[in-house]
Image (cartoon, rainbow, N blue to C red):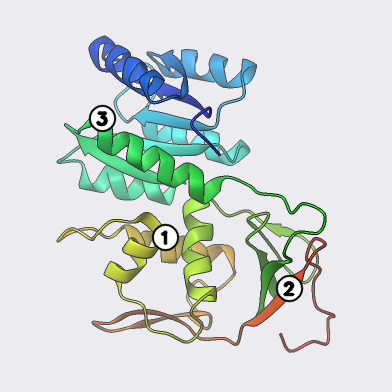
Amino acid sequence: MENSAHILVVDDDQEIRKLLGRYLQGQGFRVSLAENGREAEKCLATQRIDLVVLDLMLPDISGLDLCRALRARSRVSIILLTALKEDVDRIIGLEVGADDYLGKPFNPRELVARIRAVLRRTGETTTAPGATPSTAYAFAGFLADPATRRVVGRDGGEIALTGAEFDLLLAFLERPGRLLSREQLLDITQGRGAGAFDRSIDVLVSRVRRKLGDAGNFNLLKTLRNGGYQLAVPVETRHERQPATLPDKGSNA
């Protein structure tokens, strides 16, 4: 997804809102602005939005509540803007489905870098006729297809993962059995290092475990004390030109 992506900036601070609007337009993005949740919902209902830059403090609704509502019905990418002291809110934001966060005050250039990184991670791609076959990963009865960024189970039902959750899972699938530290996972999935109190990877691991039915079991993603995390099941790599299909019920994949 290129710079023509449509960005919705939701912030009740008029100066910040207009500044970000001008700056993002100068970077080649299409931009819509909203000063509260009501305006944001109206924009989302009438236009195709690729990514929402969402301030946590809105006059009519909590940014966390709006994030939760959006994620319940949409795959739209979300970057939260938070005050530096709001560590708890940043963690909750990731738990309810945000793809990334940025603490205020911030440099607009960093926001643009985060936007581009999220759009690269979440942008869907298609395989043209005659193109190199895509790679899919079969593991523990699931099938993950990076080309469509979807995960399905044995019953054919889709496991709804956010962009950040899929990126985390893909990091493990591409490195089966390898111990990955929090710092490595942050660098692989978000292109940034971990701060002293950054627990965003722990939050994402917990979310992926829950959605894959591994919460409390830790059979898929194991935690290693003072080490990090490890995908503890075999992974089968498949190369297909057509959309990936699930293994038969009797398969050990």
SS class of the residue under badge 3? Answer: helix
Q: Which mark is residue 232?
A: none
Q: Residue at x 57, y 22 (%)?
A: 44
Q: Residue at x 41, y 60 (%)?
A: 189
Q: Amino acid at mark 1?
A: Leu
Q: Which mark is residue 108?
A: 3
Say if residue 52 shows up in the picture: yes
User: Which comes sooner in the sequence, label 3 or label 1?
Assistant: 3
Q: Which mark is residue 204?
A: 1
Q: Few, some or many C-alpha atoms within 10 Å of disc 2 (few <14, some 14-19, many ≥20)? A: few
| Left or right position of 153 against 74 | right
Q: Few, some or many C-alpha atoms within 10 Å of disc 1 (few <14, some 14-19, many ≥20)? A: many
SS class of the residue under badge 2? Answer: strand
Q: Which residue is mark 2?
A: 239
| Left or right position of 242 against 99 | right
Q: Are marks 1 and 2 in contact (CB under 8 Å)?
A: no
The answer to which of 128 and 195 lies nearer the viewer is: 128
Q: Amino acid at mark 2?
A: His
